[in-house]
């Protein structure tokens, strides 16, 4: 499979590393908005030249931020390339899916949207859990860990030099969820903690913009800490994450059953990149079947993610 990457942040670097070690994948180019010559790397290419590779790339990974980049750039890119993205602004996914689906169908392309682990694997497990335990309550807990999407949203605020956001679940709720099952709001079950590097004169404005940012921080209990660049480099460059999807449901005679899906990640971008690569295999299956348009983890057959034949899958996994 011939692969291209748009964007070269944490996710883009993880994608590159995983692609280059996979003998079934060939990295053609990494497209950047920065000066590609500054990288001294023959894999780097200016995004201005993207269309020159229209017939040289099977799947293009969009390792871009969800706050503004993906909504602005993906609808143009899908006109000429099959794409995989990890768009994670939950509130706007329905509109984004509809737009990408329409453009992809008109251009005989496939867009695998909002993959990763949430949205993505967590979404799939919420669906499965609620299909099995039809009477009950589902709650999702994220962290403790670094959210790439929220961190990117903070970094885009004017005056922010560096930033990272930790999502912190309230452990006492998780520990008692089977006995105290109900539908919690995510802001009731999590706190958010931001570490920001900026000029001191900008601190009050930046804190205000963060805590009032719709779809990301408002109405969560959010703490913003301003630190030096040296402390940031020393303490906040790793990217662990994880979490749980927990469904507590009733079967017969008031029996309570708990369905729990858990991830513990040393590297959020490495794992997200791994899920995106699995999704790219599905993209080729969709293209082969001329099933154009937008697709998600919810409507993709599990067999599409794997390179094994149907017979091998049954032998190995059933």
Image: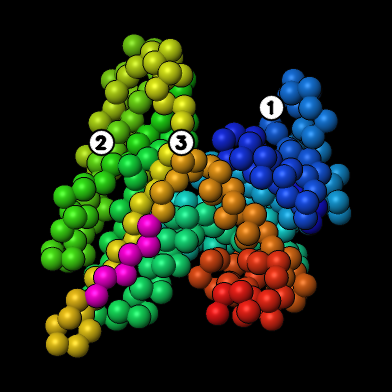
Q: Earlier in the sequence, mark 1 or mark 3?
A: 1
Question: Which quarter shows the C terminus?
Answer: bottom right
Residue nearer the viewer, 318 or 284:
318
Report the span colored magenta.
257-262
Q: Earlier in the sequence, mark 1 or mark 2?
A: 1
Q: Which of label 3 and label 2 is nearer to you?
A: 3
Residue nearer the viewer, 190 or 249:
249
On residue 34, the disc is 1
Residue 260 included in the magenta stretch of the image: yes
In x, y percent, where is residue 309?
A: 72, 75
Q: Which of label 1 and label 3 is nearer to you?
A: 3
Q: Distance from label 1 to label 2 (Cα)?
A: 32 Å
In x, y percent, where is residue 248?
A: 24, 70
* Image marks 1 and 2: residues in contact by CB distance under 8 Å: no
Q: Residues within 10 Å of mark 1 (few under 14, many from 20)?
A: some
Give the residue at mark 3: 239
Residue 252 lies in what quarter of the image? bottom left
Q: Residues within 10 Å of mark 2 (few under 14, many from 20)?
A: many
In the image, is residue 81 above or below residue 62?
below
In the image, is residue 90 above or below residue 290?
above
In the image, is residue 197 above or below residue 62?
above
Residue nearer the viewer, 132 or 264:
264
Would you say residue 70 is visible in this rendering?
no
**Residue shown at the point (86%, 54%) measured from the top left:** 55
Give the residue at mark 2: 222
**Residue shown at the point (81%, 38%) measured from the top left:** 49
């Amino acid at each position: 499979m011939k692969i291209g990457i748009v964007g070269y942040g944490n996710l883009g670097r993880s994608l590159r590393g995983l692609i280059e070690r996979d003998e079934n994948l060939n990295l053609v180019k990494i497209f950047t908005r920065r000066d590609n010559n500054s990288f001294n790397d023959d894999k780097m290419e200016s995004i201005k030249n993207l269309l020159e590779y229209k017939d040289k790339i099977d799947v293009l990974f969009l390792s871009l931020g969800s706050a503004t980049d993906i909504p602005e750039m993906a609808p143009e890119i899908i006109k000429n390339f099959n794409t995989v993205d990890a768009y994670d602004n939950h509130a706007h996914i329905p509109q984004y899916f509809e737009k990408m689906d329409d453009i992809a169908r008109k251009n005989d392309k496939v867009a695998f949207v909002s993959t990763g682990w949430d949205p993505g694997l967590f979404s799939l497990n919420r669906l499965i859990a609620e299909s099995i335990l039809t009477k009950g309550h589902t709650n999702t807990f994220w962290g403790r860990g670094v959210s790439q999407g929220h961190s990117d949203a903070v970094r885009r605020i004017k005056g922010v030099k560096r930033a990272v956001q930790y999502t912190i679940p309230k452990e006492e709720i998780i520990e008692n969820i089977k006995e105290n099952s109900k539908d919690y709001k995510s802001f009731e079950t999590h706190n958010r903690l931001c570490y920001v590097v900026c000029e001191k004169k900008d601190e009050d404005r930046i804190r205000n913009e963060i805590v009032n940012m719709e779809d990301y921080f408002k109405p969560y209990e959010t703490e913003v800490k301003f630190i030096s660049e040296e402390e940031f480099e020393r303490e906040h460059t790793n990217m662990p994450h994880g979490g749980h999807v927990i469904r507590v449901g009733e079967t017969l005679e008031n029996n309570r059953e708990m369905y729990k899906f858990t991830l513990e990640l040393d590297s959020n971008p490495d794992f997200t990149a791994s899920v995106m690569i699995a999704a790219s295999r599905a993209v080729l299956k969709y293209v082969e079947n001329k099933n154009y348009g937008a697709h998600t983890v919810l409507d993709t057959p599990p067999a599409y993610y794997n390179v094994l034949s149907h017979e091998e899958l049954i032998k190995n996994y059933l």
